[in-house]
Image (spheres, rainbow, N blue to C red):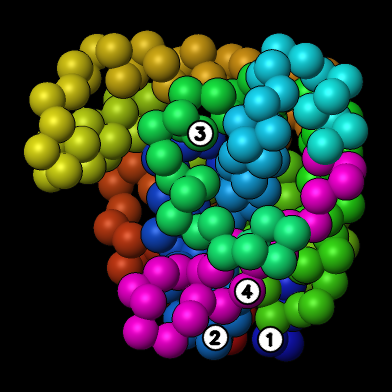
């Protein structure tokens, strides 16, 4: 395989997508693009504008009007990317608790997803990008040079998320995390718009019993 210009990585939560993508982006000197940040940025814009999160029409209109860009991180910032909303840096603001609490309904709106798909394609078409999401290989960039789909059992993914939260000083309930993941998987897999599923030509990697280094080596072998 020649060096891929666009790499698409899809899969359910905590399957290892983001960690793999960061490794690949660093190795190839590409942009790491977690497309979920687009929905966070729309949510932030709606909160700032005082728009009711349940008002799908207004939020869809907002999603079409705003300008969102994702670029390589400012040197020395410690970030994995920089995000701007209408030209202003919002990289830190999109990670607030308020955005966390409201992003799910925003990301489910069909009009918002359509608007974000167009913006994601505009950014990704610059090339030299590793894109992470749930519908990159099937909807956003079906023509991506390399498509990866990471899977892992709910139990393993819940364990990983549980460990992450413990390491950050929280006291999470493993069973609640697992149940939440099962519900999210069901919603993502059965939604009418861009359901979570591997592209027909995606390389499927089960990460249950693999370290991130082992997954990374598998993908490097594919690229080489």
Mark 4 sits on what residue?
Answer: 71
Is 191 on the left or on the right of 101, as rendered? right
Question: For residue 70: magenta?
Answer: yes
- What range is drawn magenta here? 63-83
Mark 1 sits on what residue?
Answer: 3
Measure the C-alpha gap from mark 4 to mark 3. 21 Å
Q: Looking at the rendering, in which quadrant would you find the C terminus?
A: bottom right
Dot 3: what SS? helix
Measure the C-alpha gap from mark 1 to mark 2. 9 Å
Residue 150, compared with residue 25, is above or below; it is: above
Measure the C-alpha gap from mark 2 to mark 4. 15 Å
Residue 23, compared with residue 155, is above or below; it is: below
Instruction: Please indicate, yes or no, whether residue 147 appears anywhere in the rendered image.
Output: no
Is 179 on the left or on the right of 55, as rendered? left
User: Residue, x 41% and y 16% (percent of image)?
Assistant: 180
Of 202 and 31, nearer the camera is: 31
Dot 4: what SS? strand
- Select label 2 or label 4 by which is in front: 4
Measure the C-alpha gap from mark 4 to mark 1. 21 Å
Measure the C-alpha gap from mark 2 to mark 3. 31 Å
User: Residue, x 46% and y 30% (percent of image)?
Assistant: 98
User: Residue, x 33% and y 18% (percent of image)?
Assistant: 178
Few, some or many C-alpha atoms within 10 Å of disc 2 (few <14, some 14-19, many ≥20)? some
Query: Where residue 28 is drawn, which disc sits there?
Result: 2
- Select label 1 or label 2 by which is in front: 2
Dot 1: what SS? loop
Few, some or many C-alpha atoms within 10 Å of disc 3 (few <14, some 14-19, many ≥20)? many
Whichever of callouts 1 and 3 sits on the residue coming sooner in the sequence is 1
Mark 3 sits on what residue?
Answer: 99
Is 20 on the left or on the right of 186, as rendered? left
């Amino acid at each position: 395989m020649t060096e891929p210009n666009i790499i698409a990585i899809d899969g359910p939560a905590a399957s290892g997508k983001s960690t793999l993508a960061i490794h690949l982006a660093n190795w190839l000197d590409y942009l790491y693009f977690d497309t979920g940040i687009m929905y966070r940025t729309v949510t932030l814009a709606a909160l700032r504008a005082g728009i009711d999160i349940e008002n799908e029409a207004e939020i869809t209109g907002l999603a079409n009007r705003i300008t969102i860009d994702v670029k390589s991180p400012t040197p020395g910032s410690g970030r994995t990317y920089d995000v701007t909303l209408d030209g202003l840096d919002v990289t830190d603001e999109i990670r607030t608790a308020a955005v966390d609490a409201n992003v799910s309904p925003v990301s489910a709106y069909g009009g918002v997803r359509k608007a974000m798909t167009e913006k994601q394609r505009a950014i990704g078409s610059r090339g030299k990008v590793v894109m992470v999401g749930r519908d990159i290989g099937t909807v956003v960039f079906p023509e991506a040079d390399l498509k990866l789909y990471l899977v892992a059992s709910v139990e393993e993914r819940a364990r990983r998320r549980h460990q992450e939260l413990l390491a950050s000083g929280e006291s999470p309930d493993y069973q609640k995390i697992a149940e939440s993941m099962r519900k999210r998987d069901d919603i993502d897999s059965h939604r009418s718009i861009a359901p979570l599923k591997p592209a027909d030509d995606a390389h499927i990697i089960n990460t249950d019993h693999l370290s991130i280094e082992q997954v990374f080596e598998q993908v490097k072998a594919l690229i080489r």
